Image (cartoon, helix red, strand yellow):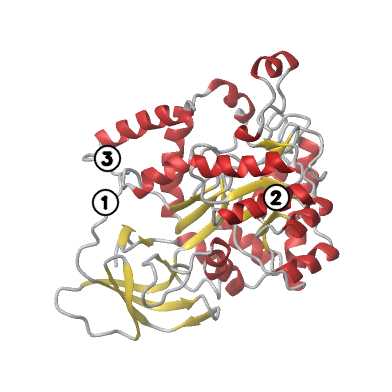
Amino acid sequence: MRLKPFFLIALASQAATAAESPSVAPSPDPGPAQALHCERLFDARSGKMLGEHTIVVRNGKIDSVVPGRAKLAEGTESIVLAGRTCMPGWTDLHVHLGQQSNPQSYSEGFRLDPTDYAFRSVGYADKTLMAGFTSVRDLGGEVSPHLRDAVNQGLVKGPRIYAAGKSIATTGGHADPSNGFNSELEHLLGPPGPTEGVINSVDDARQAVRQRYKDGSDVIKITATGGVLSYAKSADAPQFTVEEVRAIVDTANDYGYKVAAHAHGAEGMKRAVLGGVTSIEHGTEMTDEVMSLMKQKGTWYVPTLYAGRFVADKAKIDGYFPEIVRPKAIRIGAQIQRTAGRAYKNGVKIAFGTDMGVGPHGDNAREFLYMVEAGIPASYALQAATVHAASVLGADDQGVIETGKRADIIAMPGDPVADINNVMKVDFVMKDGVVYRKPDTE
């Protein structure tokens, strides 16, 4: 309960300097119609690159999409994106905007206040939007629902946020906030329960989801297996029963929520899929049996290759992670990319997510490079961050450039289908018809 007043203080301070601060969002009024002249247009539905198009934007929505250089109505603002590819704004389905890994991460939880994390999240959100990600699904962190509200109110710049709030775990599992506490501290604070997102029964499961509703979450996140970075030995042991998962999913459905399941081990994945989750996150040790079950159930896979590469690299540095974490990071981090390639070949539906917050915010697009390295075609990788991601969210108003959809549009020099490295060059960002980033020279 401390978070809200601290975060309101942070927002009040931010709002007080809005007039002179370059990081504050522009007015939500998009002004007159705008026309984007694009040398190429990526069709997210088909995965094909089209030729020159003009996209007309009005009142935050796409008014029309016309092949070639269209004749414009008087008063329309013309934005010429010469040499550039336009496409729908990207969605990262797995971020943690309230944190970013560093060698002091494990001690910071004892030293920093919620206010510190709130202020940090403002910069992380800005970097994410500037990289071309107009929407994110924040899968765990008490800051994110408040950051979402600040972005929606125009107090700070950032992507559209679908916030999970506190992840749901089991006692001792990944996302149990008391992991690593000594016995005296745990005795002083008491064991966490459903209110804190820790469950041990079907009834607890229902209560935890209802608490997330009370807290204002948009989506539910469970930790179906151990985790790489949690202060615990196992990264892959199953940590929920099928009945507990099903209770979470059924209760989430009552509130219109979808459920994302962090999972590294095969048995935990299997239970999560059988319980009806919408997506499996990470999926490191996914077996052919699990893949078959996911295809049968229509379960999405969000690989988070960036996080795997990042933790495997940092585990080589003495002192970066606690010793209980290093073996997990080395073993599991290197395996995720191979699993993603196998899943694609086996026809599992893949959507885009990075687990950013493990790695540095703003570098999210590097995930595309790792997906292509894994054997996923560039066009499919781009669909994973656009139309596929919108499907995972259940958001039918974004993810494509079509009349009537949100005017979330990004552009970059070159053709990212021909050379995926071009995704690292985004220099035009529009969200809801508001331009946040323009090329230095149009």
Instruction: Residue under label 1, please give it.
Output: 26
Of tags 1 and 2, the one toward the viewer is 2
Residue behind mark 2: 247
Q: Quarter of the image holding residue 335?
A: bottom right
Q: Horizontal and vertical percent for residue 66?
A: 34, 84
Query: Between marks 3 and 1, how big is the CA–CA gap?
Result: 11 Å
- Mark 3 or mark 1: name the one nearer the start of the chain: 3
Residue 320 located left or right of residue 406: right
Q: CA distance from mark 2 to mark 3?
A: 46 Å
**How much space separates mark 1 and mark 2, taking CA atoms?**
43 Å
- 317 or 85, which is in the foreground? 85
Amino acid on which the number 2 mark rests in the picture = Ala
- Horizontally, residue 425 falls left or right of residue 93, namely left
Depth-wise, is mark 2 or mark 3 nearer the camera?
2
User: Mark 3 — residue?
Assistant: 21
Q: Are marks 3 and 1 in contact (CB under 8 Å)?
A: no
Residue at 81% x, 34% y: name it.
Answer: 233
Secondary structure state at the residue bearing disc 3: loop
Question: Foreground: 391 or 251?
Answer: 251
- Name the residue located 48 percent from the left edge and 32 percent from the top edge: 117
The image shows residue 30 at horizontal and vertical percentages of: 24, 61
Residue appearing at x 31%, y 32% in the figure = 12
